[in-house]
Amino acid sequence: MKILTDFTSPNWNRRPSGSVIDTVILHYTGMKTGLEALHRLCDPAAEVSAHYLIEEDGRVFQLVAEENRAWHAGISSWQGRENINHTSIGIELVNPGHEFGYQPFPKEQIDSLLELLAGIKARYRIPTARFLGHSDIAPDRKSDPGPLFPWQYLADHGYGIFSAKEAFDQTLIPRNPTETAAFDKLNKQLVIVGYPKKNCATIDGSAAQALAAFQAHWRPAAVTGTFDIGTAVVLNDIAEMILVGDS
């Protein structure tokens, strides 16, 4: 793979001593063009960056050296760990995003991503389950790379986990004041997967955002932020994969 170095970002610092790279975070650029995104990621005034940007045609730009800490995750947490910038590689995929006309990710772009991920996974022995989206680690703030991102396809190639369980049933699970078991389990399993602990007794606010982030990654056909039978089935399966160490 040819890595282009036409653009370099000044927006990085050293990783904290003892940091181990064990996570990959995938983003979309959310800007009108890839060139516009490259300029912003390299603008010192913007104070944002990523290690890599992949254009729609498959070109790969390296903006920050992997050993350095790029500024892509922001306020973030996963499985009880905060400041995910410390231990992650950030990859931006050129896509206009929800603001400018969200669209499927082209095959050329995903092919280049897979080739890039192969090297990163081998270099750092990234656990299979730690290929995540920006919305996973910051569900209160971010929605990228969104439900059109091919998470199942990546998982089929060894980058992430995915459930094969049938999840078509969108029947809502009612909140019964005298029956809290389903919602207690929901809270517990979202934390097992990696999301910050929320009070999901009523699915609204930040709890709905966390649930929608889970759905965008693992149940993209129904990103509702509501708790239904299909979501419960998939969540249970993903949580079990994490617990048994399928990562």
Image: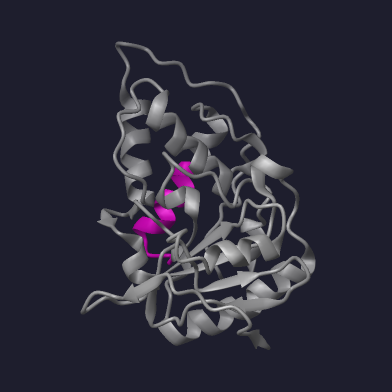
Specify the quadrant that holds the N terminus. Answer: bottom right
Asked if the stretch drawn in magenta spans residue 79, the answer is no
Residues 75 and 31: in front is: 31
Looking at the image, residue 56 sits to the left or right of residue 132; the answer is right
Specify the quadrant that holds the C terminus. Answer: bottom left
Q: Report if residue 22 is visible in the image.
A: no
Residue 178 in the image: above or below residue 147: above
Rendering colour mode = one colour
Looking at the image, residue 201 sits to the left or right of residue 117; the answer is left
**What secondary structure is the stretch in magenta mostly built from?**
helix
Q: Residue furthest left?
A: 17
Residue at image coords 26%, 53%: 80
Asked if the stretch drawn in magenta spans residue 244, the answer is yes
Residue at image coords 37%, 20%: 202
Q: Position of residue 150 (x, y in %)?
A: 67, 57
* Image quadrant in which you'd find residue 206: top left
Q: Position of residue 16 (x, y in %)?
A: 24, 74
Q: Residue furthest top?
A: 177
Residue at image coords 42%, 70%: 11
Residue at image coords 37%, 42%: 190
Q: Position of residue 167 (x, y in %)?
A: 61, 38
Task: Count the numbered circles shown.
Answer: 0
Q: Report if residue 71 is visible in the image.
A: yes
Q: Position of residue 68 (x, y in %)?
A: 38, 79
* Image quadrant in which you'd find residue 209: top left
Q: Residue furthest front?
A: 45
Chain part drawn in magenta: 235-247
